Image (spheres, grey):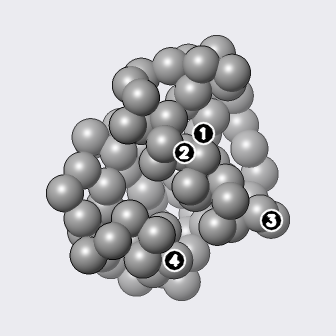
Amino acid sequence: MRNDTVIEEWARGRAARSANLWTDGAKLYSYGLVIGEGSGGTIFNHTTGGGSYFSQTTSCHVGLAMRLTPSANIITP
């Protein structure tokens, strides 16, 4: 499954999985790190700019989630 599809399913409250990005429908995970919760309601900004960098791939996952769920609250952990 593609990463964008995983994020779309998260926003719908449904479980989905790709290689390193998955959701149980409520939380969105990148390599086991929670990067979102509330089925598209909140995104944790685990990027260099967000101040809590984890990895380049996680930064890409966070950026994609922000683009696909523009109404989400962005939290700087």
Q: Which residue in the structure is indicated by mark 2?
A: 62
Per the image, label 1 sits on a secondary structure element best described as: strand
- Asked where in the image residue 18 lies, by quadrant, the reply is bottom left
Residue type, numbered disc 1: Phe
Residue 55: image tag? none
Q: Where in the figure is residue 67, as x and y percent of width and height?
A: 68, 59
At label 3, which amino acid type do we have? Ser
User: Marks 3 and 1, Cα distance to the nearest angstrom?
Assistant: 13 Å
State the SS at label 4. helix
Q: Which mark is residue 8?
A: 4
Tell us which disc is closer to us: 1 or 2.
2
Compared to 69, does 50 lie above or below?
Answer: above
Query: Given this view, does label 4 or label 1 mark the residue nearer the observer?
Result: 4
Question: Are dots 3 and 1 in contact, CB under 8 Å?
Answer: no
Q: Residue at x 43, y 56 (%)?
A: 28
Give yes or no for contact between labels 1 and 2 (Cβ–Cβ under 8 Å).
yes
